[in-house]
Image (tube, rainbow, N blue to C red):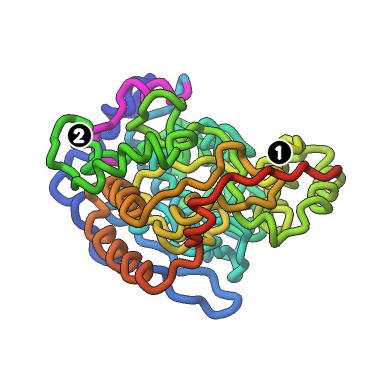
Amino acid sequence: MSTHRWTAAGLITVVAALSVWLCAVLSAPAAGEDTDAGPPPALPPGQAPPLPKAGALAQPRSQDQVGLPAALTKSVIPPGSPLTPAVVLLGEKLFFDSRLSGDGTVACATCHDPARAFTDGRPVSIGIAGRAGQRNAPTILNALYNKTQFWDGRVDTLEQQAALPITNPFEMGAASIGDAVAKIAGDTDYRGQFNHAFGRDVNEQDMLTAIATYERTLVSFDSPFDHFIAGEQNAISDAAKRGWESFNGKARCNLCHALTDNQRDATVFTDNDFHNIGIGIIRHRVVPLAAQAERDLAQGHLQDVDQAAIASEMSVLGRFLVTKKQSDIASFKTPDLRNVLVTAPYFHDGSQETLWDVVDHYNKGDGLANPWLDNDIQPLALTEPEIDDLVALMVALTSPQYKERGDKDYARQLALSKVSRPQRDTARAFGPKPPRPKPPPL
């Protein structure tokens, strides 16, 4: 394969070159890939999750996707990015290589399983030696469109994002990036691939660049909703169509899941901003935690912020860990909604099990005693049919590679919603918005 360095406009071409042979197989998972819906099995104490396989769902995605925003895609590729097949293939290999972890048990793919739309299906991720973090694993799909990475936006680029989990003691647990590099530098195949991709020996920066470049090929569109927006009126159900109207109206979803408040956004489903939506804050000692964060993270060292976010109770502070602004307390990044059906459980702490739970949370305007609650959170007065319509819309955002899993998980979530709706509070949902208490001094 050529080692020519493409310009930003070359992403689509590279993806096409890598995925021509996939056109016939991407609709079905590769042998050995997890196709069961629902949560993954529990782990024995001290054990890391099994390593996912790099099957067809791990491959760079085809350019032939209805709804793929070509202009936006070109604009978010960093200038000079080495978008070559050799670099992408190297990045994929590194993404699945557990040798980058401290004990050889955990890889990037452990928390970002292609079969689960590059999430792990757990409320919070489990890393080296079975250590549980504080955050739910966000999908890597379409992460190239994020203006910041991680739930709290503590880094801007995918290269920076690739580095931090490798050394976090609750994730991959390597002693240092240099240690991880040394483990693969002795591999003859890797030395050949690095030289083919970059023209030099194994090194830290090229390793991170390769992983990030691979992640930039994981674009996911072509859902029934995309076909509907493209003019295929029968591509989605009437319920999903009603859900789309509610999404941009009564349900107020577009206030966060769109690039602007006043124009419909059918592409990325995020405002790339941070919001306190009332999740988890009441059960934490937020004021003393914020004061502790101001002391402990006064120097703003990225490694310290990363460890606080993943390994400590200060995780609940969200964006505040980065900015130290009181208005950012317990604010977290708005996630993209694509493939949301197959990325349960939901929110930054994985506290909600079904899409019905998610809508119920917003419907009642939860977090009323939370002084930092986002101003847009309020009771919505959605009826049960209107809630079902919103769920139908989110189901319609499932890309074709995940249809089989999505069908199974929809059935599972629907059945669960019939017997368990812990977030439902109809009286509050149809009541007035109470005044928000003033924030206490830190």
Foreground residue among 202 and 45? 45
- Reading the image, the residue beneath label 1 is 322
- Give the number of the mark in front: 2 or 1: 1
Q: Residue at x 28, y 41 (%)?
A: 61
Q: Residue at x 50, y 55 (%)?
A: 361
Q: Residues within 10 Å of mark 1 (few under 14, many from 20)?
A: many
Say which amino acid is labelled 1.
Val
The image quadrant where one finds the N terminus is top left
Residue 181 vertical position relative to residue 34 in the rendered view, above or below: above
74 drawn magenta = yes
Q: Position of residue 394 (x, y in %)?
A: 33, 48
Disc 2 and disc 1 in contact, CB within 8 angstroms = no
156 drawn magenta = no
Say which amino acid is labelled 2.
Asp
Range drawn in magenta: 60-78
Q: Residue at x 54, y 61 (%)?
A: 351
Q: Position of residue 348 (x, y in %)?
A: 56, 52
Q: Earlier in the sequence, mark 2 or mark 1?
A: 2
Res. 33 mark: none
Q: Is residue 406 left or right of residue 119?
A: left
Q: Position of residue 441 (x, y in %)?
A: 86, 43
Q: Is residue 14 visible?
A: yes
Q: Position of residue 46 (x, y in %)?
A: 60, 75
Please tell me whether mark 2 sits on a helix, a strand or a loop: loop
Residue 436, by quadrant, is top right
Q: Is residue 370 left or right of residue 264?
A: right
Q: CA distance from mark 2 to mark 1?
A: 38 Å
Residue 6 vertical position relative to residue 204 in the rendered view, above or below: above
Q: Residue at x 76, y 53 (%)?
A: 286
Foreground residue among 1 and 430? 430
The rendered magenta stretch, by its main secondary structure, is classed as: loop
Res. 64 mark: 2
